[in-house]
Image (tube, rainbow, N blue to C red):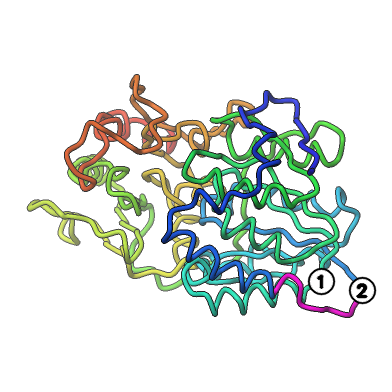
Amino acid sequence: MPEIFNSSTPTVNFSRQRFETAWFWRVLPAGMRRRWWLFRVFDLIARYWPVFANRNGLLVVRMDGIGDMVLFRQALDLHADIFGVRNSDIIVLGCKSWASVADELFKNYRLIIIDEHAFARQPFYRFKISLMVRRLNVETAICDSYFRRAMMADSLVWVSAANTNIVSLPFINEPTRTEFTYYLSQVDMIIDTGPYPTHEIIRHCNFLSALSKKPLLPIAPSVSWEEELNSFPINSPYIVLSPGSNEYGRRWPYENYTTVAKNLHDRGYSIVIVGGQDEHIETPPEQLDSSNGVTDLAGKTRLPELIKILKHAAATVSNDTGPAHLSIALGTPTVVILGGGHFGSFFPYPDTIALDHVRFIYKKMPCYHCFWRCHKRASKFEVFPCISAVNEERVTDSVLELIQ
């Protein structure tokens, strides 16, 4: 049985008996069972692949998005002292979504980037990656992500076959309980980083505090980016709007962004719109364009260029997305428009981290913490009511307050 370490925060409701009944495959649906067995065959081969070398190093599994990476980055710098290794002995296993900035943000660490989507769907790619992870032959493997997928993050820890495996207690619901039951039964230590909705920054702190056996203070997100902004087609000062999201419901209505943009443009600021290729925005008839001081770069910039744009902006207005975390970490005045799906887990930041250059704007509702399973909208393409309820004037005033 693995040791379940309870941090200073209250424990989540998790039954130890679940670990003692590992015949979980019997209750899996037929389709999931077939996929699980197919993946497990390759995972088993990789885990028990013979490697004749001395074990060395620490494997840190980070199968998460850009925003999660930003929240974790400062905590990584504490790992060397806590685990008694050099930075060069720490291997960060990261995601393709932030590969283009990884070398700059993870200097002095060994870095391996994988395509997380291919790993979750393609058996032979999964086997290739799992075999590579096994051949690293690390001494210790860890994963402290709270919201994670067992067949991705936990399986990578497992196939490493490290001498010591340490993970945090994840968020577990009924659909994910059977998979987590197996993987959590295989590790050496499970650290309870706190009940939902403990913020991710606090979770990283609790995880490392448990390992170091002394209380550590949470660290505000911060990233350094030295490259300058060259050949940018907009005169300063400019304000960045990030109106997209991979979840339609979290997109504050584009008409509201239009109003905010016009208010800021009337005060002498140029407007730059950013977003990803897959963050399609339904533009209203009265669209923002170059005729009223707007440069639309949505889908036209890579992540390094986005970071430079955010760094040199007078301010950023963003939905609950990765660019919001990046903007905050770069020190840019940032206004974040929030809903209540998992309020407090990622946004807003905890009170223990005082950031004067950030404003979190939201409208509290009784249905907060719905995990974005909203029953108040007719289709998944509608905006969540808690998002649409955010007032345009509050957003504009918050931007001006930060700038002034």
Comparing 205 with 325, the one in front is 205
Q: Is residue 387 left or right of residue 207?
A: left
Tally the marks.
2
Q: Which amino acid type is marked by label 2?
A: Asn
Q: Name the residue under label 2.
A: 54
- Residue span colored magenta: 46-53
| Residue 324 part of the magenta-drawn span | no
Measured as percent of width and height from the top left, residue 226 is found at 61, 64
Q: Is residue 48 magenta?
A: yes
- Label 1 sits on residue: 137
Report the amino acid beneath label 1: Asn
Quarter location, residue 220: top right
Residue 271 place in picture, x, y as percent:
29, 53
Q: In which quarter of the image is the N terminus?
A: top right
Q: Residue 183 shows which numbered tag?
A: none
Q: Can residue 330 be seen in this view?
A: no
Q: Can residue 379 be seen in this view?
A: yes
